[in-house]
Structure formats: structure tokens, C-alpha cells
Amino acid sequence: MTFPELAEALGEPPAPEGTWERRALLVSAAALRRRVPVAELAGRVRAVPGVAGVAARANGLLEIEVRVPGTLLESFEVPAIPEPAWPDFPRTWDNPGFVVRYGHARAQAVTRWARALGVPGDGFDPAALDGPWDRAVLRALAELPGRAVSREPGWEAYLVRLALAFHDAHERAPAVPRGDEPARPVHTARVRLAVAVGQVLIGPERM
């Protein structure tokens, strides 16, 4: 499944809901906004490969469960995001500009380390991104399509949340092998995730 296919079936991008730690849920108000029968729209969504389930809520929203959330990265597109006017200093966690720029620098470092440690760039397996820290980053990235078409995207707060999720993943679910650990498919997948984060966050190559 690709997320653009899902957006095409709905007529607009769905929005992620919950933490995604256990279930990757998306919700859509497309049936209400477009005045399409809920059952008809649900049928279209069920036909999209990779959709694990579709349910109509009492309020008219569609709840969609994605079987493998890592498939988000198979057709990843980054909208134009304006750079916030954050100060460069202080370079502490209290400065949102530092949080975001350091996140970008860390994502760039991951790709350099991966090359040096021989992590394969090919053979991406979306299912390998199944840990809670990986899923938290994917959940944040899943907001991009909806925010890109929103009148009030809230980019500044979003960039900080994405950066914080990536910092947690970077420290708790490393993208590169440690010590004598061999490179495994999960490392290739996490490098792919870091590349996506680096494309969204704004900052220098090194800090």
C-alpha cells in the first residue's frame, strides 16, 4: 500500500490518530465533507492493498487501520515547509530551533555512519519498523500530507514534535549497528526512516 493511494480513494489525505504503538490508525472525515455515503467510501478504502480494516464511527468518521505503517516511506513526499525564524542560540533543549536543527544534523549523521559501517542501502523492509520508537516517528511523518493541504498547518510545533520523536528513536532504537553487531534489515529500515526525517527537518549537516 502507498499512502497516496489511500488519499486518492478518500479524495483527501487521512489524519493519523493515537500513538501507533500498537495499531496504526488513520481517521477521515471525507464522507462528511464530500457528502459521499460512508459505506461507499469504506468500500473504496478496503480495496486499497495494505489496509487492515475500516470502520465507520457513529460521528461519520472513517477509522482506517494500516497493516504495515512503514509503507509510508515507500512513496514519501515532502511538502515545502517554511523555515521558522528561530534563534541559533542558546543551543539547549529549551530552544525549539536547536531541537529541530540538531535533529536534522543527527539524521544526516546516520546516513554517513551507515555507509561507513556497511549498512545496505537496498532491501528496505517496511515491516522492520515495528518497534515503538520507530512507530512514533512514522506516526509523526504521517501528518505531513494532511498538514500540507491545511489552511493552518502549524509547522513550527509539528517540526519540534517530529524532531523530539526522532531524538528518542535515535537514542533508543539505533539505526546503525553497535559494537560487533552485524547490520540487519532493521538497520536498513531505520536508515531509510532517518533519511525521511532529514528531508523534513531543517538544519545544518553537522552540529
Image (cartoon, grey):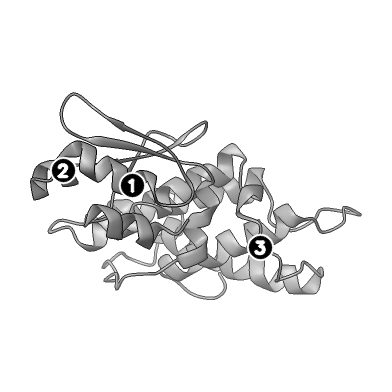
Nearer-N-terminus badge (3/2): 2
What crowding class fits label 3: few (fewer than 14 Cα within 10 Å), some (14-19), or many (20 or more)? many
Cα distance between the residues tagged 3 and 2: 34 Å
Residue at the spot of label 1: 45
- Give the side of residue 184 with respect to residue 193, left or right: right
The total of numbered circles placed on residues is: 3
Residue at the spot of label 2: 31
- Give the side of residue 21 with respect to residue 18, left or right: right
Residue 6 placed where, x, y %? 35, 54
- Give the side of residue 103 with respect to residue 191, left or right: left
Cα distance between the residues tagged 1 and 3: 25 Å
Q: Residue at x 29, y 73 (%)?
A: 80
Label 3 SS: loop
Query: Which amino acid lies under the numbered mark 2 shown in the image of this protein?
Result: Ala
Residue at the spot of label 3: 124
- Can you say which quadrant of the picture contains the C terminus? bottom right
Query: Which amino acid lies under the numbered mark 3 shown in the image of this protein?
Result: Phe
**In the rendered image, is residue 118 in sight?**
yes
The part of the image, by quadrant, that contains residue 98 is bottom left
The part of the image, by quadrant, that contains residue 146 is bottom left
